[in-house]
Image: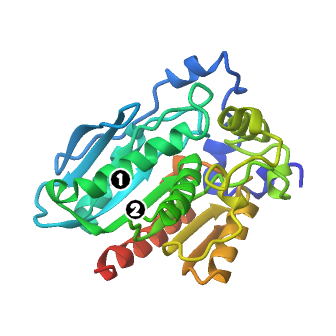
């Protein structure tokens, strides 16, 4: 189908029917990165502290913790979205304002480097350094090092999936779970959903730009490691339990569904949700009933992970 706007949930139509990022170009990235993103008021009930992971180069992380929670708690290491070329860990603030007091978790937001200035493996290396730092400093951060999970949205979910693979193969840091929201997993862009023209919020052109920026000379070749594009991974066994969610009119739909199916086939428990009428970036319309349903499913799954992994 060439025009997915006809399939858009009616509650999202007034906001997202005509929403598009400006065409992504290397020259235009600075202006796009400098465009302020609306942020809701922050909660006084969550403490946020800034830390620098002493890797090379150093990686900024923001630790979120509800002030009234004592003892060692589960943690979620989070990677923001932005197609690997834009975005900041500031967009995690509202999420952890909700999650930290509700689930008693500690949130760790990673300010990973962006492409094309820092192509693969730079952003993934930053995320691994942050995960390793979280594990090594768990006690002083009030974290149970056996209950550290990963979360990401869009490109951040792709990084989270690659990070789960990398952590499994290095065997240095255990990962308890992975929450992949609208994950960007496949650089090849050969699925039917990725080929649709007129995709809302994140277009085919934007997706091509993001992958080309991230992979550099590897883009368009078979020389792409599975840690860079998790859809390329052949062996998905022994990965942590997963949650995968995606909109039915998101260009990432088919790669997300395929990845979830292959996780289950590999013996990895994976819960999959595909929401009708939702495009990429549906969180921009939080009041919509189907968006609230998606958030509820994610929250319910996370609650089970942080209370059963003991």
Q: Which residue is drawn at 53% across and 64% down?
A: 169
Q: Is residue 256 visible?
A: yes
Q: Residue at x 66, y 71 (%)?
A: 235
> If you read the primary sequence from the N terminus, does the residue marked by circle 1 or circle 2 appear first?
1
- Quadrant containing the C terminus is bottom left
Query: Which x, y percent locates residue 207?
Result: 72, 41
Residue under circle 2? 172
Relative to the observer, which residue lies in front, 139 or 70? 139
Residue under circle 1? 132
Label 2 Cα neighbours within 10 Å, binned few <14 / some 14-19 / many ≥20: few
- Quadrant housing residue 303: bottom left
Query: Which x, y percent locates residue 292?
Result: 48, 63
Q: Which residue is drawn at 31% across and 49% down?
A: 133
Which marked residue is nearer to the observer: mark 1 or mark 2?
2
- Distance from Cα at disc 1 to Cα at disc 2: 8 Å
- Quadrant containing the N terminus is bottom right
């Amino acid at each position: 189908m060439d025009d997915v706007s006809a399939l858009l949930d009616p509650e999202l139509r007034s906001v997202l029917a005509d929403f598009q990022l400006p065409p992504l170009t290397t020259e235009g990235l600075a202006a796009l990165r400098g465009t302020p993103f609306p942020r809701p008021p922050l909660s006084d009930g969550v403490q946020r502290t800034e830390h620098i992971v002493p890797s090379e180069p150093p990686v900024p992380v923001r630790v979120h913790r509800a002030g009234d929670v004592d003892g060692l708690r589960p943690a979620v290491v989070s990677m923001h979205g932005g197609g690997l070329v834009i975005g900041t860990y500031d967009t995690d603030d509202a999420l952890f304002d909700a999650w930290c007091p509700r689930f008693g978790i500690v949130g760790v937001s990673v300010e990973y480097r962006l492409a094309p200035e820092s192509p693969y493996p730079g952003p993934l290396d930053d995320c691994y350094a942050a995960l390793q730092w979280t594990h090594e400093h768990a006690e002083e951060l009030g974290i149970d090092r056996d209950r550290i999970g990963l979360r990401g949205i869009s490109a951040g979910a792709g990084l989270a999936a690659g990070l789960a693979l990398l952590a499994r193969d290095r065997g240095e840091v255990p990962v308890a779970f992975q929450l992949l929201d609208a994950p960007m997993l496949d650089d090849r862009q050969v699925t039917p959903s990725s080929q649709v023209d007129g995709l809302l919020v994140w277009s085919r052109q934007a997706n091509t730009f993001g992958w080309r920026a991230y992979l550099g000379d590897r883009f368009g070749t078979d020389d792409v490691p599975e840690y860079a594009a998790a859809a390329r991974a052949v062996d998905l066994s022994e990965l942590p339990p997963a949650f995968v969610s995606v909109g039915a009119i998101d260009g990432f739909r088919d790669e997300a569904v395929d990845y979830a199916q292959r996780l289950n086939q590999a013996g990895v428990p994976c819960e999959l949700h595909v929401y009708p009428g939702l495009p990429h970036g549906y969180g921009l319309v939080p009041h919509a009933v189907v968006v609230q349903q998606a958030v509820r499913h994610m929250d319910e799954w996370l609650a089970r992970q942080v209370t059963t992994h003991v």
